[in-house]
Image (cartoon, rainbow, N blue to C red):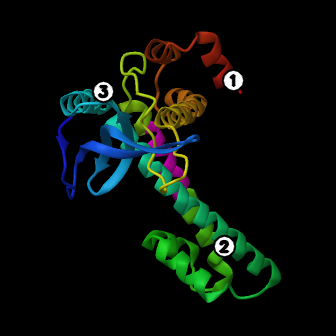
């Protein structure tokens, strides 16, 4: 992956700086020579990596090697970053849902600020479906928003899983971390990847039973076709279809 020193408006790339940097750990802070890398999506930092090493040439070579090593993961990291942003919106929607349900239960109008935030988050179809002209229908609107965001989070997790390389063949250096506030501990990128991929796998796994049932009952595939396509045992397929 190309290393640059300039922020770009779009695209996934790496910004690298070589020289004297400040380093911090639990023992204190010091200055030493090394390379700082940032995996970028346009102007947004997706992940950062700081490696202490003497010598400009050695630092440049190390930076280039790490940029190349992270490239297979770039699309997956981007998907997980999008999922994290969607989760923040989902948390907001769930909080607004709780407040709207409390207002509905008490028979009180929803606070104007809460209502406006829901209107801002909602799509036109959600507004129409919820009939949200009434204060007392804002809880259904919040529920629709939350359901949409849940689906979007799941879609990004599944996409991250589909785009991920073989972890055994594309190791991620332990120095890669998520961006954070200066002076605060940063979350490990490799652990974030592991959690995200496991969530994506679990989401796909949960789709197996309804998908097998739909494929046979609605799409007209035979049980043999399902078994050959998925490698799911015939016993399991029969059990799912006989529920």
Q: Residue 59 at x, y = what percent?
A: 25, 32
Q: Nearer the viewer, residue 150 or 6?
A: 6
Q: Name which of mark 3 and mark 2 comes first in the sequence.
A: 3
Crowd rating for badge 2 (residues with CA inside 10 Å; few <14, some 14–19, many 20+): many
Q: Nearer the viewer, residue 76 or 178?
A: 178
Q: Name which of mark 3 and mark 1 comes first in the sequence.
A: 3
Residue 25, placed above or below residue 145: above
Q: Secondary structure at mark 1?
A: loop
Which residue is situated farthest in the right direction here? 106
Crowd rating for badge 1 (residues with CA inside 10 Å; few <14, some 14–19, many 20+): few
Q: Which residue has dot 2 on it?
A: 139
Q: Which residue has dot 3 on it?
A: 69
| Alpha-carbon span between mark 3 and mark 2 | 47 Å
Are discs 1 and 2 less than 8 Å apart at CB? Answer: no
Given this view, does label 1 or label 2 mark the residue nearer the observer? 2
Q: Report if residue 152 lies within the magenta region.
A: yes
Q: Residue 45 at x, y = what percent?
A: 35, 51
Q: Secondary structure at mark 3?
A: helix
Quarter of the image that includes the C terminus: top right
Residue 163, placed above or below residue 7: above
| Alpha-carbon span between mark 1 and mark 2 | 38 Å
Q: Residue at x 59, y 71 (%)?
A: 141
Q: Which residue has dot 1 on it?
A: 242
Q: Residue at x 30, y 27 (%)?
A: 69
Residue 119, placed above or below residue 58: below
Are discs 3 and 2 less than 8 Å apart at CB? Answer: no
Q: Which residues are magenta?
A: 148-158
Left or right placement of residue 119 versus residue 235 in this view: left
Q: Secondary structure at mark 2?
A: helix
Left or right placement of residue 46 versus residue 63 in this view: right
Q: Quadrant of residue 236?
A: top right
């Amino acid at each position: 992956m190309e290393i640059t020193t300039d922020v770009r408006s779009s695209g996934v790339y790496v910004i690298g700086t070589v020289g004297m940097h400040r380093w911090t750990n639990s023992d204190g802070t010091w200055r030493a020579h090394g390379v700082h890398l940032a995996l970028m999506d346009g102007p947004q930092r997706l992940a950062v990596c700081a490696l202490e090493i003497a010598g400009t040439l050695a630092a440049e070579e190390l930076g280039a090697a790490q940029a190349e090593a992270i490239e297979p993961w770039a699309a997956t990291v981007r998907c997980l970053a999008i999922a994290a942003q969607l989760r923040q919106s989902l948390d907001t929607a769930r909080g607004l849902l709780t407040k709207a349900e409390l207002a509905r239960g008490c028979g009180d109008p929803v606070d104007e600020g809460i209502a406006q935030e829901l209107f801002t988050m909602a799509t036109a179809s959600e507004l129409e479906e919820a009939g949200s002209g009434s204060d007392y229908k804002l809880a259904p609107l919040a529920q629709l928003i939350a359901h949409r965001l849940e689906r979007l989070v799941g879609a990004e997790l599944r996409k991250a899983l589909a785009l991920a390389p073989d972890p055994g063949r594309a190791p991620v250096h332990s120095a890669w971390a998520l961006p954070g506030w200066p002076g605060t501990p940063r979350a490990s990128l490799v652990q974030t990847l592991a959690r995200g991929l496991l969530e994506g796998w679990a989401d796909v796994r949960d789709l197996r039973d309804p998908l097998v049932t739909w494929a046979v009952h609605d799409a007209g595939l035979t049980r043999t076709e399902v078994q050959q396509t998925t490698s799911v045992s015939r016993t399991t397929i029969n059990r799912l279809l006989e529920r």
